[in-house]
Image: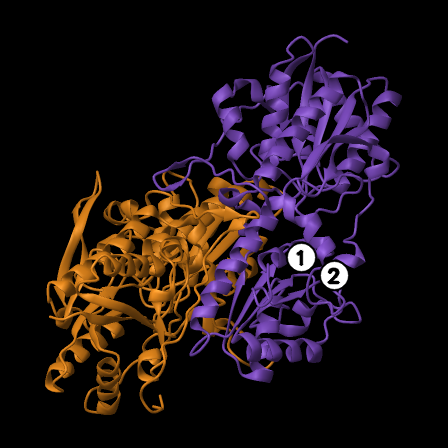
Chain colours: A orange, B purple
Amino acid sequence: MAVKNAFYAQSGGVTAVINSTACGLIQTARRHTDKIGKVFAGRDGIIGALTEDLIDTSLETDEDIARLRYTPSGAFGSCRYKLKSLEEHKAQYERLIEVFHAHDIGYFFYNGGNDSMDTAWKVSQISEKLGYPVVCVGVPKTVDNDLPITDCCPGFGSVAKYVATSIREAGFDVASMARTSTKIFVLEVMGRHAGWITAACGLASEKEGDPPHILLFPEVPFDPDRFTARVKECVERYGYCTIAVSEGLSDASGKLIAETGSKDAFGHSQLGGVGQVIAQLVNDRLGYKYHWALADYLQRAARHIASKTDVDQAYALGQKAVELALAGRNAIMPTIKRLSDSPYRWEIGEAALKDVANVERKMPADFISADGFHITGQCRAYLQPLIEGEDPPPFKNGLPDYVRLKNVSVAKKLGEFKV
Amino acid sequence: MAVKNAFYAQSGGVTAVINSTACGLIQTARRHTDKIGKVFAGRDGIIGALTEDLIDTSLETDEDIARLRYTPSGAFGSCRYKLKSLEEHKAQYERLIEVFHAHDIGYFFYNGGNDSMDTAWKVSQISEKLGYPVVCVGVPKTVDNDLPITDCCPGFGSVAKYVATSIREAGFDVASMARTSTKIFVLEVMGRHAGWITAACGLASEKEGDPPHILLFPEVPFDPDRFTARVKECVERYGYCTIAVSEGLSDASGKLIAETGSKDAFGHSQLGGVGQVIAQLVNDRLGYKYHWALADYLQRAARHIASKTDVDQAYALGQKAVELALAGRNAIMPTIKRLSDSPYRWEIGEAALKDVANVERKMPADFISADGFHITGQCRAYLQPLIEGEDPPPFKNGLPDYVRLKNVSVAKKLGEFKV
């Protein structure tokens, strides 16, 4: 194959380490100039491809590309934009191929979650049919940790480390104050459909009595009576109670608890407020003073406390994506393959995109304790290695010194396309 | 003076570095066994003294005391409990002296904010009168940064570093997503009466366009029209808008915005939700999608990203407190004295407790920009050194490895006392 350019796009919610993948990918591509010309990135993800809004990463210095390894967020912009089915919206796929053709792009790297793997797979199919074959490689990324086949998903380990650290620290704080002040602390975390991030909070509790004392998973229907009874027991035993709750906590009928709780002055349901709802419930029933925190984007952007394991895996997947593409492996996704829990050993494996696309991995039932309020030993064994190791960014003026790239646009060659 | 024991108590809301002060104080006392016998700590602060619930810190290993330097929260427990005036509640002061006398305590170290300095001062007065003189030394601590005379207060610098780091990271995240998703991010921070912590968020914005774009101070009456106009301008210019808001944001009449916003299902006002209120306001008026985060206790407990300057100052103040006491300096508080901004140089100074007690330092008016939405150069020059330097704790199993002391009680010698 002659020298071809590559196209790389970031997709969906960004993470603390997706740029580490970009770093691994671009650095590896730069070592193979015999096969890969320039790496173009989509400005704001796949929308950049559809609108021919490409970024020329070759104009970034080696030093700045190296800095991506420790910079959170999506350096080229990401988007929430799902391509429709081939039947429904063939024009979008044809447009992608047209843009790839116009810019001599022979490699497509799509860095995202389920939807993105589906898109990458479809592009691999249609590019053949349209007579412009492109090697399509999916690169996993999602804090939701819900991609199949791969043992874990880059981005998750760093969120896990952040939430476990945060709830440990808040737990120490509340323990100090509980006698005369706050007895209840609630941390609301992400993970609408699966309790991976909630489970990760449990890592902070290493022995009897350590916070967090209660985890509220989206997988376990919320029972206010059982919950408040457990809180009371906990306060009586330890003097305080620290709780992690998933934004997706629901009742037995599947209704989100965040929606049952409160409305704002305009009558809107307050989403992202389940932490407040359950803290207030405890206060109403038991009278304990509470505080609550909503980590929101802080949890997925917190590169300052990223997991080194996560950063390394994210990088390695970007590197491997290029190696697979250079070997002509089409419609594939590099994966993390766990070789052993302790000592933790892993290597890069691979999965066919068609086996990944649209398959959602759930948290195993035996990861949640029988009473539904904590994690099991199996869960701990799985999660523990994913938060191991620190890899702090450099600091300047007391703050993490992250890079902003120049992100220079490539001259357009085609007409407009409406997305 | 013969060998006397010392009493140390932590007071009010705890911080990431109050235990660094405890570490400096206890380590220094251990080097002066010719004058200081044991250091007793109040279990849960001054309540421990009133109830004769003393902790014998001499039973903690040197290694564990050293670990206090990097452990957040109050290792001996703290409390929100203000001693009343001497006239109103003389019995409390007499009880304190009785407990000190019973345990041969000649030094009283009180580690807290305004109220605590007032208490320490009163104890210094009454102990003379009651014929059992005790050397009373106040040791400053408060994330509110509102003690007078001292240039800054231990605990504040670490909160400042945490919030500035967090809003920078979230700002990178939102910048990536803004084209198709979230355009507004709001971080709600502590500081009900003064905007010090809100101002610290501004440090993350080092050049035009850097987040955070808007700071909402408790000192500046909230004007919804001016605010939303500024948000719109910001989104049009940068594509997104990142906002830090103080929990104490109020309208022109002094009413908290958090109280004007929303009520929960039970009709309670939702405090600690001003972030949500102003984010929803933007959504209602401008239609932008938003996310918001509530840092709450995470911000003051985040020892993993403490400021080294803050940790060092907290330690030095604990050390100096003992040195002052040994020199017989009564009714005094060691302070931080700034010698220069850049390079930052500081030394320990001192203030009379009577000059500190009940005096609240406000943020200077010229620290807020003319439009009321950001910090000035003067403010930056003041704040910048306080977040400098990193001093991460050791990690174990991927998490900060904080110490929990044994906290063994001293045998009681007196009857009960009701607090």
Above or below B173: residue A418:
below
Mark 2: few/some/many CA within 10 Å (<14, 14-19, 20+): many
> How many numbered dots are placed on residues in this image?
2
Q: What residue type is labelled 1?
A: Ala
| Secondary structure at numbered mark 1 | helix
The chain carrying label 2 is B
- Mark 1 and mark 2 lie on one chain; the one further toward the N terminus is 1
- Residue B189 position, x and y percent, is 61, 58
Q: Quadrant of residue B13?
A: top right
Find disc 1 in the rendering and name its residue.
B199
Give the CA separation, mark 1 to mark 2.
8 Å
Kindly indicate whether the residue at mark 2 contacts the one at mark 1 (C-beta within 8 angstroms).
yes
- Residue B328 position, x and y percent, is 79, 17
Side (left or right) of A139 relative to B406: left
Q: Which quarter of the rendering shows the N terminus of chain B?
A: top right
Mark 1: few/some/many CA within 10 Å (<14, 14-19, 20+): many
The chain carrying label 1 is B
Find disc 2 in the rendering and name its residue.
B368
Above or below B96: residue A128:
below
Above or below B50: residue A130:
below
Same chain, marks 1 and 2?
yes
| Secondary structure at numbered mark 2 | loop
Q: Which residue is drawn at 24% across and 68% down?
A: A37
* Residue A261 in sight in this render: yes
- Residue A35 position, x and y percent, is 17, 65
Q: Which amino acid does label 2 sit on?
A: Ile
Side (left or right) of B368 relative to A380: right
**Frontmost residue, B247 versus A88:** A88
- Residue A133, numbered circle: none
Q: Residue at x 63, y 64 (%)?
A: B245
Q: Quadrant of residue B27?
A: top right
